[in-house]
């Protein structure tokens, strides 16, 4: 605890060159769902939602943080944790370097402290552009430390997940991260902690089958694919075509798996409302 | 009924040769004692050459052997007074999971295990040991009951993974697995898990959050089946043997990574060669670990389990710019 005083805390504002590098100015963008072509600038202004069909484009961690936290300000924690190659898995070390370079991230999750609508939270955001958001030792450790931070500070935990599943290059070590994160959540929740989990496109396998499904409130963005086994694996197993909307947020809502599907433009307001209702600060309304 | 695996074939051939020679000697009344003795020597030598240095892929094939004993075999051989219980109280009785009450050396325990089928018909009923959400919820119900009544929990892990199907997804496979991980972390009773065959992915881990996790010598445990890894990484499921080597799936590997606490030895040639002997070895290990865990209070058991999983992971730290 004393050590924390000396830990370097960086005021991380969304680095502008990062977003610029992803989508060079002036470039057009095609909606993967309806095919409509639109200006990248316009798309960004619209929170990366297609103006024609409402499709929610995938966001990287820093884009999400900018949209979610007050002034986009995050006190990042554990930013220096990096993956090793404990199994000496063929090709893993090189792939890690390549993923770091292409995404500008050190691993698939960014965690830290910030405020949403004035309410302090611990926030975790995964990024699909780093190794398909897969969970290895680093993701598991950072998620666990974020949960422990929220437990220690007695603030709510808000988590945006997106992941292809366990990182198989760390095989058993990544599998065990499912148990580690879930056990940390058990402590947090036993202590009365509030956990709001938001599924974004796509969240599958080891992440959806551990901490991400254990929210007090489980939300999802429209159209987000959320499930355990992927569509292709299932189609190969049951040898049947699956419905078009299989494993979409709307499908999962209908099957009782989600509390709510929340449009990106309404996400922050809803999070603020939920945080408010758990803040214990509610004031009695004026009685007419 | 050939039960030998490809790498065991030289042994089977030598055995056949010895038997033929014996038969021929008896028939023709010729004394081959010396010759047979030499071949038996050679057999022993070959046996240790083959079994003492099995590769990860060979161990994988051993773990999947069609005659390998299942959870129910061990339940009947290790315990007494087994009362099988059924159902998740909500949707169905998933036969990919078996469980109930039994006694281990007179001590009442709760048992939960994955159950593969013995033949095709049985396998279809049991979904080849791959549970649906109702299976995990059935397991959770038994474990919650154990926690309530202060009974130790013993689990047998033996699955390729959770069932990958539309019905499983519709009933929230992810949540069912996640819930077990969270709940198992909270129980104040000893939990001992034994990987007896294949420990595949989240479907295995959903019965795997124990104070002690043990593995049979030729069992495997991994985040994804080697076949699945090969088809994703190299777009070629037939490279499963290669993936098996790369993924570090054997009991020895997992002991080195401190994921498991103990390796339970198998009879030469695998558990299926001598079920009774295997059951004895499992019983001995379970009893030894259970006696140790029974010295702990419920809070100590929870904390012991928390720390066991909390420390798992290998990572480095980068210099901050």
Image (cartoon, coloured by chain):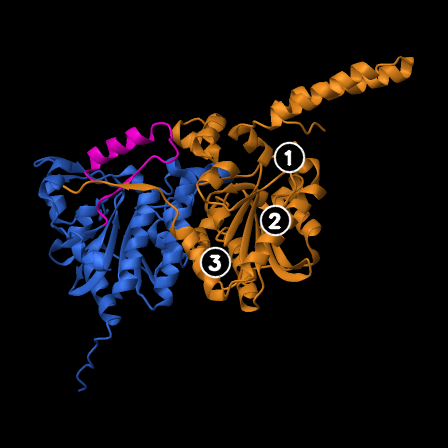
Chain colours: A blue, B orange
Residue toward you, B6 or B107: B107
Hey, which residue is sitting farthest bottom in the picture? A288
User: Is mark 1 in CB contact (under 8 Å) with mark 3?
Assistant: no
Q: Residues within 10 Å of mark 2 (few under 14, many from 20)?
A: some
Tell me: A151 left or right of B312: left
CA distance for labels 2 and 3: 21 Å
Residue B285's disc is 2
Residue B270's disc is 1
Decide whether residue B256 is among the magenta residues.
no
Question: Disc 3: which chain?
Answer: B
Dots 1 and 3 on the same chain: yes
| Residue A243 x, y percent position in the rendering | 41, 45
Work out whether mark 1 precedes mark 3 in sequence or the reverse, and give the earlier one: 3
Tell me: A38 left or right of B115: left
Residue B135's disc is none
Quadrant containing the C terminus of chain A in the rendered view: bottom left
Q: Residue at x 79, y 17 (%)?
A: B36
What range is drawn magenta here?
A78-105
Disc nearest the viewer among 2 and 1: 2
| Residue B25 x, y percent position in the rendering | 87, 15
Disc 3: which residue: B184
Residue toward you, B128 or A225: B128
């Amino acid at each position: 605890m004393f050590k924390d005083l000396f830990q370097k805390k960086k005021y991380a504002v969304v680095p502008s060159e990062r977003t610029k590098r992803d989508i060079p100015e002036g470039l057009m963008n095609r909606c993967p769902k309806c095919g409509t072509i639109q200006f990248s600038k316009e798309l960004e202004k619209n929170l990366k939602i297609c103006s024609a069909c409402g499709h929610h484009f995938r966001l990287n961690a820093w884009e999400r943080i900018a949209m979610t936290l007050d002034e986009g300000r995050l006190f990042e924690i554990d930013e220096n944790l990096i993956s090793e190659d404990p199994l000496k898995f063929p090709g893993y070390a090189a792939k890690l370097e390549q993923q770091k370079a292409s995404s500008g991230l050190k691993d698939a999750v960014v965690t830290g402290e910030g405020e949403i609508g004035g309410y302090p939270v611990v926030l975790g955001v995964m990024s699909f552009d780093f190794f398909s958001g897969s969970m290895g030792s680093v993701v598991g450790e950072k998620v666990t430390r974020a949960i422990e931070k929220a437990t220690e500070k007695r603030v709510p935990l808000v988590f945006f997940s997106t992941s292809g599943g366990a990182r198989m290059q760390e095989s058993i070590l990544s599998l065990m991260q499912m148990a580690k994160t879930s056990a940390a959540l058990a402590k947090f929740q036993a202590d009365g902690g509030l956990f709001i989990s938001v599924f974004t496109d796509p969240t599958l396998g080891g992440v959806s089958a551990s901490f991400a499904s254990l929210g007090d409130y489980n939300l999802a963005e429209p159209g987000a694919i959320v499930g355990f086994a992927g569509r292709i694996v299932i189609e190969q197993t049951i040898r049947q075509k699956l419905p078009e909307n299989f494993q979409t947020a709307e499908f999962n809502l209908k099957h009782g798996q989600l509390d709510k599907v929340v449009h990106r433009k309404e996400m922050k307001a809803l999070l603020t409302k939920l945080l408010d209702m758990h803040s214990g600060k509610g004031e009695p309304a004026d009685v007419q | 009924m050939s039960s030998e695996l490809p790498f065991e074939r030289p042994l089977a051939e030598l055995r056949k040769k010895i038997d033929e020679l014996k038969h021929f000697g008896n028939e023709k009344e010729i004394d081959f004692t010396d010759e047979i003795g030499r071949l038996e020597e050679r057999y022993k030598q070959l046996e240790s050459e083959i079994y003492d240095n099995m590769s990860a892929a060979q161990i994988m094939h051993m773990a999947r052997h069609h005659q390998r004993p299942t959870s129910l075999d061990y339940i009947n051989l290790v315990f007494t007074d087994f009362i099988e219980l059924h159902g998740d109280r909500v949707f169905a009785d998933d036969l990919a999971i078996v469980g109930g009450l039994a006694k281990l050396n007179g001590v009442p325990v709760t048992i939960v295990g994955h159950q593969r089928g013995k033949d095709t018909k049985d396998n279809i009923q049991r979904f080849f040991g791959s549970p649906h959400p109702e299976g995990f919820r059935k397991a959770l119900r038994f474990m919650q009951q154990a926690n309530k009544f202060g009974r130790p929990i013993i689990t047998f892990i033996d699955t390729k993974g959770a069932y990958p199907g539309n019905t499983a997804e519709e009933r929230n496979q992810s949540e069912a697995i996640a819930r077990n991980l969270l709940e198992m972390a909270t129980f104040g009773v000893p939990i001992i898990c034994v990987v007896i065959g294949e420990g595949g992915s989240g479907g295995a881990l959903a019965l795997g959050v124990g104070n002690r996790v043990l593995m049979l010598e030729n069992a495997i445990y991994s985040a994804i089946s080697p076949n699945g890894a090969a088809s994703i990484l190299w777009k070629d499921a037939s490279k499963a043997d290669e993936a098996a080597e790369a993924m570090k799936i054997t009991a020895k590997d997992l002991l080195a990574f401190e994921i498991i606490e103990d390796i339970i030895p198998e009879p030469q040639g695998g558990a299926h060669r001598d079920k009774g002997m295997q059951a004895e070895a499992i019983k001995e290990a379970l009893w030894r670990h259970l006696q140790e865990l029974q010295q702990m209070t419920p809070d100590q058991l929870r904390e012991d389990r928390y720390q066991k999983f909390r420390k798992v992971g290998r990572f480095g730290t980068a210099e901050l710019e």
